[in-house]
Image (tube, helix red, strand yellow):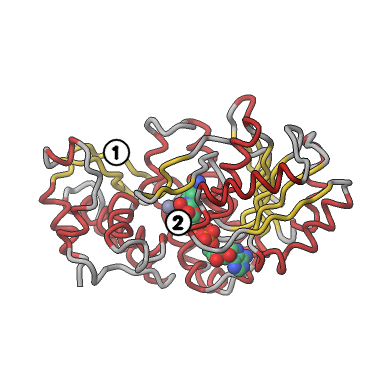
């Protein structure tokens, strides 16, 4: 097992990464001083896969567990579902000393995290992420959220978990598209801050594609370490945390322009990273050789390098509508080399449009 510490003073916590950890959750949380009852928020399908071992282990540590099922899909991140969870928690007699266990991907993590952050003004939270994306990203950093009709993640609180328990073996059941999507985020960590991770991804692609648990543990450990370091230094995203948005500025625009229906998140940011790296290369910040390495790696993992729909101008119209954009200049995270990025504050509309056109098929 690997342990990464997220350093946030009094709110510090550990991320434990290992194989078949779910069976040991009771023992692994024993030092945290959590209460004796918890709400286990998850999807029914995941409960069938992992519920027995999780509950068995928690009960072995004398915890009472109240499972609460939410439907799969983004629409569960709603006030309606938050309220239903509060209601079941109240009916079950869960109080301020109780805690929440979030077992699932980013949807469960964000929703259960929001509930934990607000129920009785905030109770303890344990994240047990089960998608690749949630294991390397969503479960870490303390951001929780629900959606409004007008947009995603518009309501939320910062609520750091007491522990994040990453059981790599859960990834065995993930469908290939979700798995690939997680890899997009992992490549991002390599490019922004960890050349060793990037090289490992280059040289162990076959095993990683086969979901070799040992290799995955290594990859997730490195990815989590990058995020933990960045979050520790900048919890509320004032400056450094922005580097985590590499590939996301255009990636998010592409997702929004296609109403989140066409590209998986990791696919959209793969295209976003292609555009950002190309802009960096055109401006002379990034060597062609490094640009080619990123292209080859994304391709190796089956991630898209270009997009067909919608048209470039439409993607552009979904970029942040702040003042800077109106003046025709935007801030982008651009790579300098593999393992290092910087915030470029003067990217012109022309440069963005030519990148969008370059990768439009
Ligand atoms: N809080 C943050 O910092 C943060 C960061 C990134 C993304 N997010 C949020 O995360 C959400 C997306 O998360 P996601 O990509 O994990 O999607 P998700 O939670 O919807 O999970 C995708 C699907 O995989 C299934 N699944 C989960 N684990 C599985 C497993 N081990 N085996 C088989 N199937 C499994 C789920 O039931 C679901 O149907 C978005 O709402 C996004 O806004 C939050
Ligand atoms: Zn992301």
**Whole-percent x, y for residue 96 in the image:** 73, 32
Q: Relative to residue 18, is residue 264 depicted above or below?
A: below
Q: Split into 4 quadrants, where in the image is the C terminus?
A: bottom left
Does residue 93 appear left or right of residue 68 in this picture? right
Instruction: Assess disc 2: are there few (<14), some (14-19) or many (≥20) residues with their C-alpha within 10 Å of its C-alpha.
Output: many
Specify the label residue 185 is tagged with.
2
**Whole-percent x, y for residue 70 in the image:** 61, 58
Does residue 247 appear left or right of residue 65 in this picture? left
Does residue 225 appear left or right of residue 167 in this picture? left
**Whole-percent x, y for residue 267 in the image:** 38, 64
- Mark 2 near ligand 2 (CB under 8 Å)? yes
Number of numbered discs: 2
The residue that label 1 is drawn on is: 343
Residue 196 visible in this rendered orientation of the protein: no
Q: Relative to residue 171, is residue 230 depicted above or below?
A: above
Residue drawn at the location 76% of the way across and 45% of the way down: 38
Q: Nearer the viewer, residue 104 or 276?
A: 104
The span from disc 1 to disc 2 (Cα, nearest Å) is 18 Å
Residue 62 visible in this rendered orientation of the protein: yes
Residue drawn at the location 17% of the way across and 48% of the way down: 283
The quarter of the picture where residue 219 lies is bottom right
- Mark 1 near ligand 2 (CB under 8 Å)? no
The quarter of the picture where residue 313 lies is bottom left
Q: Nearer the viewer, residue 332 or 313?
A: 313
**Whole-percent x, y for residue 91 in the image:** 74, 45
Helix, strand or loop under label 2: helix
Q: In terms of sequence position, does the residue under pointer 1 or pointer 2 come before the other?
A: 2
The quarter of the picture where residue 343 lies is top left
Helix, strand or loop under label 1: strand
């Amino acid at each position: 097992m690997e342990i990464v510490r997220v350093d946030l003073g009094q709110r510090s916590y550990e991320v434990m990464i290992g194989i078949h950890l779910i069976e040991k959750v009771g023992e692994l949380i024993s030092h945290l001083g959590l209460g004796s009852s918890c709400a286990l928020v998850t999807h029914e399908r995941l409960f069938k896969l992992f519920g027995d071992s999780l509950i068995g282990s928690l009960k072995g540590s004398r915890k009472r567990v109240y499972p609460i099922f939410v439907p799969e899909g983004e629409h569960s991140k709603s006030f309606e579902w938050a309220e239903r969870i509060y209601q079941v928690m109240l009916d079950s007699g869960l109080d301020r000393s109780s805690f929440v266990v979030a077992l699932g991907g980013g949807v469960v993590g964000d929703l259960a995290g929001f509930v934990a952050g607000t129920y009785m003004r905030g109770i303890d939270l344990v994240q047990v992420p089960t998608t690749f994306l949630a294991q390397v990203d969503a479960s870490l950093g303390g951001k929780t959220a629900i959606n409004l009709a007008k947009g995603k993640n518009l309501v939320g609180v910062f609520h750091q978990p007491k522990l994040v328990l990453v059981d790599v073996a859960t990834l065995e059941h993930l469908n290939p598209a979700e798995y690939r999507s997680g890899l997009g985020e992992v490549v991002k960590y390599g490019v922004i801050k960890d050349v060793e991770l990037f090289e490992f991804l280059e040289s162990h692609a076959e095993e990683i594609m086969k979901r070799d648990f040992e290799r995955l543990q290594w990859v997730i450990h490195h990815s989590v370490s990058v995020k933990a370091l960045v979050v520790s230094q900048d919890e509320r995203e004032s400056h450094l945390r922005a580097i985590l948005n590499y590939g996301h500025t255009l990636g998010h625009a592409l997702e929004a322009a296609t109403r989140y229906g066409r590209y998986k998140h990791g696919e959209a940011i793969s295209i976003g990273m292609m555009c950002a790296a190309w802009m960096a290369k055109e401006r002379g910040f990034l060597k062609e050789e490094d640009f080619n390495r990123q292209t080859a790696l994304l391709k190796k993992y089956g991630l898209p390098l270009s997009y067909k729909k919608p048209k470039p101008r439409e993607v552009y119209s979904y970029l942040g509508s702040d003042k800077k954009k109106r003046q025709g200049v935007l801030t982008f995270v651009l790579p300098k080399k593999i393992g290092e990025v910087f915030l470029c504050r003067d990217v012109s509309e022309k440069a963005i449009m030519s990148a969008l056109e370059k990768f439009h098929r």
